[in-house]
Image (cartoon, rainbow, N blue to C red):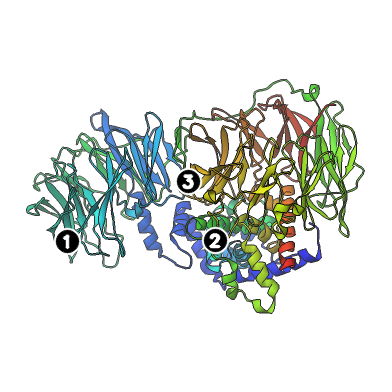
Amino acid sequence: MVGDLSLATTIAAETVADAAAGDGAALARIVGAYHDDMARVAFVICADQDLAQDAVQAAWPQAWRKLKTLRDPERLRPWLVSVAANEARQLMRRQRRHVVVDLAVADLGSVRQDPGADPAFLDLAVALRRLSPEDRTLLALRYVADVDATEIGRVLGMSASGVRSRLSRLVARLRSELEDA
Amino acid sequence: MPDSTFEARLASQLGAYAQGGVRPIDRYAIAEATIAAGSRGGLGGRLGHLLWPSGTRLSPRIVLVLFALLALAVALWIVGHQHPGIPLGRIAWVKDGDVWVAQTDGGEPVKLIDDRFADFPFVHWLPDGRLAVARRGGMMIVDLASGQTRDIRDPDLNPGPANLTQWSPDGSTYAYEYGGENVAAGIRIVDVATGERREIQLAAIDRGDFVANLHWSPDGRWFMGTRNGVVLIDAATGDMRQVLRTEFTDYAWSPDSERIAYSAVSPIGARRIAVIDRQGRPVADMAVSGPGPEWGSFQNLPDLKPAWSPDGQWIAFRGTPGLTIARPDGSDRRDLVTGPVAWFEWAADSSGLSFVSTASMAADAGELDWIGLDGRDAQPLGPSGIGAYDMLGRPASRPLEPLPSPIVTPGGSLAAAEPTGIATPAPAAPAQPGASWRGLAFTTPAHDGDCVEVNVVEFTTQTRSPVADADCHASWVPPLSPDGSHVIIARYTEQSGITDPQILDLRTGARTALHIEGLVWAYWSPLGHWLAYGAGAQAGVVSADGSRHVDLTSTPSCQGSACGSWHGATWSPDERRIVVPTADRLLVGDGDATGLHPMTDPSTDLSRGYPGGYPWESWSWAPGGEQFAFERDDGIWVADAEGRNAHLLVPATYGGLSPGDWAPDGGRLLVSHADLSGAKEILVYDTAGGSMRKLADVPADDPNGVGSGPVRWSPDGRWVAIPYGGHVDLVAADGSRTIRLDHATSLAWSPDGRFLALVWGGDGSNGRIDVAAADGSGRHQVIQLDGPVIDVAWLPKG
C-alpha cells in the first residue's frame, strides 16, 4: 500500500547504459521518471522543501557516477530513491549541528493538499517531527517509495527482519499517536 | 508486510504529505548539471553542496574559486635535503577536508586527520616539527614523532576559506582577528601550551569595522593587516598605524621583520612587486610582465604571492605565468620557471623552491617539482607519489591510498596502528564445534517473505528439521534468543495478525504461552533471559520461562501516555539494568523491570542536543551496566546508569559519530562515522587511554552490494566482525590484522567465542551456513538451502 507513485514508469536497460556513458538525453529520461519519487522521499525525511531539493540535487551526481556499475536496471528506481534518502539523512545530520529544523508544521503550506481539510494531516506532520531522520527514512522508503525491507536494510545497514521489526514499532507508535490525537 | 486499515491510511497520508517535496523541474537541466558535476569528481559536487545553503545557489565560478582556495591550503615545509637541491622532510596538505602528510618525495602518504565535514582545515608546521591543524572550533597539535596529539578547544576559531590564523615565530601562540557588528575589533592570541587566551583591543577601529589578513612579524612584535591599505599593529599594545595606502593583493614580512614585500595591481592591470620598510618608506619596485586581469574574470588573477627566502636574500613571486626570484632591492632578477605555477614554497636552507607546475592557469592538475636558485636541478618530486597534484584534490598519477598508520581521528587522538593488510584464513582442519555445541537454529522466509520458518541443523546429522508445528511465524519478530536456547513461535494470518505467541525451549521442547494479545513486536534481552514486547498500546517484558511478566505501561513511573507500545526496554549487556524510553524521558531500573524511576538529574539534561527531537536514538550500554554511551551532535557522551555525570567521551568536529557496541571488557567502544555519501568508518575508542583507531571503511551505495550488517565484538573481545559487500572482515581489535571471509552476509559467534557460524544469502536465493574457527580457519559447510537464511543462533548441548 503506497502513496502516489510513478510505479508504472520503466526505463530500458539501454537507456541506463546510455545515461551512464554520458548521454544527456538518456539521463534526462531517467530524471523525468524518478526525480519526483526522490523528492518525495527526501521531503518526508527533511520535512523541508529546500532541504529536500538540495538532497536530491546532491544525489544525482553521486548516482550518475555509479550508474555504470548498476547490473540490474530493475533496481534503478529503489536504488535512486535510496541514494536520495541517504543524502537527505546525511543532510539532516549535518543540519542538526547548526540549527534544529522546524519540521513539517511550518511547511504544510507548501503541501498541495489543504491541511485544514484533514486534521489528521496536521497530526501526521507533527508525529513525523518527533521521529529521527532514520525513522523517517524507514517510513519514506517503505510507504512512499514502496521499497521492500531487504532493500531498505541495504540502505540503512540493517537486516531485513530488523527493518520489519522497526517498521512495526514505528507503525505502532504512529497508530497510537495519531489515533489518540 | 502485513496490511491493515491503519497502515493503508498511513501510506495514503504519507504519500499525500510527500507531494510537498515535488517541484516542477527541467529534467534536461538537471541531467546536464548532473553530468557536469559528476564529471568534476566527488569533491566538486560535495563541496558545492556543502557551500550551497538551503534555497541558495552559488555560481560554479565561485565554487571553483573556493576549490582553488582549498587547494592553496597546501603547506610545504622542507627541513633538509638528501643531496643538493632535493628537499627531505614532510609535506602536509588538505584534500577534501582530510589532512595528509607524506615525505616530500611523495612516499609514505598518511591520512592524518579524516574529517570530511571539517570547514576548511589548515595546516602549519611549527618550528619544533609538530603539525598544527586549525579547524573551526579548535586547534589540534600533532607530534608525528611520538604520536601524541593535543586539542585546544577554541570555539571562536574559524579559519574560513582563506586561513586567517597566524602563528608566532616560535610556534608557542597563534592569533586571529575578531570583531563585528556588536563586538569591538581586536586580536586574540592563544597560548598553545596552556590554552590561555589574550586579547589586544584595536581602539582605533570603529565597532563594526575590522582589520583583515593579519600577518605576524617573524620577531613577534608586530602584526601587519589590511584596512584601507596596510596597517602595522603593535602586538603588545594594539597601537596601529597606516604604512601603505595603495591597492595591493598580497604581502610578506622579511625574515628580519624590517621590510615588507607586497604585490599590487594597478587599475589598468599593471602588476608589480614592491618592498617597503616598516615605516612605509619604499625600498624597491619591480614591474611584472604578463597579462593583467580580464575585467569581470577570476581566471587570470593569480596572486603574485611574494615570498622571502628564509635567509632574507631573495624574494620569489609568481608571474603570469612563471616563477621569478629577485634580490630585495630588485636586482639579479631570475625567471626560474616559465610555465604556470599554482604554488611554491622556499626550501628551509634557501637553496631552491618546490612548486606545483600546471599546464595552464585553469588546469585542474599539476606536478610538484623542485628547482634550484640558478634555474638548474629542476626535477619532479616523487613521480610515484604526490608528485601529481590536483587542484581539485584528486591525485592525478596514482591514488593516494590512506595508510592506517598513524591516524588521527575526529576526536583528536592518535593511534599508532600497524598497517593492516587483508588476509585470507590459512587452510586448517575443519572446525569441529560439535563437541561443545549441539547445532544451529536458523530462520528462513516462508510465504513470500511474510512469515519465517524456524529450523534446527544438528552438527551430528547436518540435516534440517523444523522446530515448531506452526505454519507461519511472524517475520518481524526476531525469534531466536541470543544463546539459541529459546525461540518465539506464533501464528500469523492477515486476518488475525499474530496469535498464540509462545516461547519454545529448544533444549527441552517445553512451551510457555505468553498470553499477549495483539503482539506487534518482540526482541530478546542480551543474554536471552528476557523478552521485550509491544502489543496494542501495551509494552512489557516477560522472562524466558514465562514466570515473570511486567506490563511496563502500567507502572507508576509511566504515567499514562508517556509510555506506549513503541517504547521497548533496553537491557545492559549483563541484564542487570534496564532502561525504558518514554515519550519525553528515560526510566531506569533493575533488569527485572523493578524499581523503575525517571532519570531526572537536571545537570545532565541529555536531551538538550536534540530539542524537540529524538534524544535516545543511538546509545549503547557498557557491559557492567554502570554507564552508557549516547550520541549527541558534538560527539559521543557517556553517563552513568542514572543519567548523571555525563561527559563528552569522543568529541567530534562534526556530527555523525555513533556509538556502537562496547567491548566485553568495557574498555573499548566501537564508533561508527558516516560520511556524506553514506560510507562508514568503523573506529574503536579506548576509553582508558583516550585514543581511537580506525578499523575499517565500509562503502555505501553499492547498487549491487549485499549491504552491511551490524558490527559486533567477538565474545573474547579480540576481534570485531564487520559484514559488508558480501563478505565479513574479521579485524583484530588492535588493528594489527584483518581476515576476510568471503561469501558471508552475517555471522554469529558461538557464545564461548571459539567458533563462527557464517551465513551466506546475499544473492537472495541460495542460502548456506558454514562454521569456522574464531579466526575463520577450518571453514566448512554445515547446510545448503534453496532459499535465504535470515537469522542464526548457536544451540547449546543439554
Q: Are marks 2 and 3 on the same chain?
A: no
Q: Answer with left or right where residue B712 lies relative to residue B503.
A: left
Measuring 71% from the left and 43% from the top, which residue is drawn there? Answer: B762
**Figure quadrant of the C terminus of chain A:** bottom right
Chain letter behind tag 1: B
In the picture shown, does residue B295 fall above or below B278? below
Check if mark 1 and mark 2 are on a common chain: no
Query: Mark 3 — residue?
Result: B652
- Residue where numbered disc 2 is placed: A55
Query: Mark 1 = which residue?
Result: B270
Q: Of callouts 3 and 1, which one flags the residue occurring earlier in the amino acid sequence?
A: 1
Residue B281 at what x, y percent from top left? 7, 54
Residue type for callout 2: Ala
How packed mark 2 is, by other alpha carbons closer than 10 Å (few <14, some 14-19, many 20 or more), is: many
Query: Tag 1's secondary structure?
Result: loop
Give the Cα distance between marks 1 and 2. 45 Å
* Residue at disc 2, secondary structure: helix
* In the foreground, A45 or A15: A45
**Pointer 3 chain:** B
Question: In the image, is B149 to the left or to the right of A129?
Answer: left
Q: Quadrant of residue B623?
A: top right
Q: Secondary structure at mark 3?
A: loop
| Gap in angstroms between the C-alphas marked 3 and 1 | 47 Å
Q: Quadrant of residue B64?
A: bottom left
Q: Is residue B708 above or below residue A107?
A: above
Q: Residue at x 24, y 42 (%)?
A: B168
Q: Amino acid at mark 3?
A: Ala
Task: Tell which tag, 3 or 1, sits nearer the viewer.
Answer: 3
